[in-house]
Amino acid sequence: MDSASGIRVKDIHGREYIDALGGAICTSCGYSRKELAEAAKEQMMKLSYAESWSGITSTAAIDYAHALSEFTPQGLGRFFFVNSGAEANETAYKIARYYWATKGFKEKNKIISRNLGYHGLNMVSMWATGIPRFQGKLGVPDPDIVNIAECYCYRCPFGKDYPGCNLECADALAQAIEKQGKDRVAAFVAEPIYGVSGTICPPPEYFPRIKEICDKYEVLFILDEVMTGFGRTGKNFACEHWNVTPDMLCMSKGMISSALPIAGVAFTEDIFQGMLCSESFPHLHTCGAHPVSCAVAKRNLEILIEENLVENSAVMGKYMLDELTKLQEYPFIGQVQGMGLFLGFEMVQDQKTREPFKNKEEKKLAKAILEEGVIVRPGGSRIQIGPPLIVTKDDVDVILAAIKKAVANFKV
């Protein structure tokens, strides 16, 4: 790609495409926003750098934290700013272990995650990621990371059907905590909606049950909202769909429309006070809480609010989901799911058996959609869609027309 503006990108040959994936589901306010460039320039001319680990910070970081605290779920008003989603998750694991250590539980250091989850490819996050292909040949798994069964109703790992399943996938967390010992488990981490594994949504009772289990066993609950945060699902954060507030919430991507590197962990006052009353938290980054990134992220947040992009995500997402669901008239289209502008559908050999294709048919379909001028993401027998939140109904109609044409002409 050579240039981009709004929801459209242009390649080196001058051909223009609608990016219905929003980069890596991250350019929420669109490409090449003049306002973000101006915010970066203004901050660079004022204060281009400030270290953030020896009691010094910048007014840009403070101003952003204040603005962000009005946007995050109530109770999550303390922040640690880093540079990427993987760093945010690693920071959350470290905070969890440190929190328990300051309370005298130095052995309470295990992290439980889920199969199919993706949390980045730093060493700890890589093992918390429940997708084997990302772990490659990197040795013995981290013994302090425990994976439990995925929440995937369309392909239930327990062979059950929702709602008669009684949320066995959620109860797997309680069983894992009891097996490891509650005095050994520091935290549970999950994506509200699976991202890299293909926009897989949970039933509405799942995360409330998860929260109950975490509270019962005194395990910190970490939600990885790197992909789902900042209006992507039609709420400020996906956890708001189920009225669940985690102990820590990881964020990046839509936080700044990926115009610059920034990420963060939001956490409760209880966790903050626990860290404050102990010796210095041993965690720092040269570019953490970078003033330029903070200034641009604040302007990005203002755009989200000024242009009602969270509401637009909900409205356009509902329209797009309704239209995509009609694709199930084709025998090779299986489950269609999504919340807001975080959508996807699965390709199957048979709708009744739900058997997935084994020869990467989703890549062939994504290529056909690309030939119609629209970018989507193939992977794991699924097609994923996540356009910038500025998308209009006219834009959505163009995206849908390209997908429908490619599906109608597709030869299995």
Image (cartoon, rainbow, N blue to C red):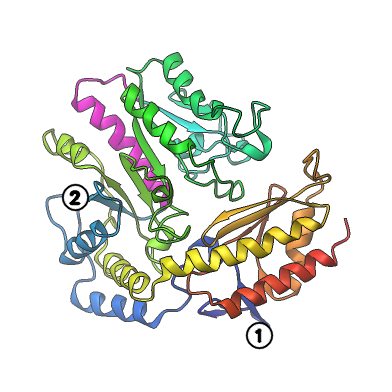
Q: Residues within 10 Å of mark 1 (few under 14, many from 20)?
A: few
Task: Write down the residue under mark 2.
Answer: 53
Q: Position of residue 199 (x, y in %)?
A: 58, 50
Residue visible at 46% across and 60% down in the picture:
234
Task: Write down the residue under mark 1.
Answer: 14
Foreground of the two, 51 or 186 = 186
Which secondary structure, mark 2? loop
Could you tell me the amino acid type at mark 2?
Answer: Trp
Quadrant of image for the C terminus: bottom right
Q: Position of residue 149 (x, y in %)?
A: 57, 29
Magenta segment: 85-109
Give me the C-alpha separation between circle 2 and circle 1: 45 Å
Which secondary structure, mark 1? loop
* Residue 283 within the segment the image draws in magenta: no
Chief SS of the magenta region: helix
Residue visible at 83% across and 44% down in the picture:
350
* Residue 92 within the segment the image draws in magenta: yes
Could you tell me the amino acid type at mark 1?
Answer: Gly
Residue that sits furthest to the right in the current view: 411
Does residue 27 appear in this view?
no
235 to the left or right of 380: left
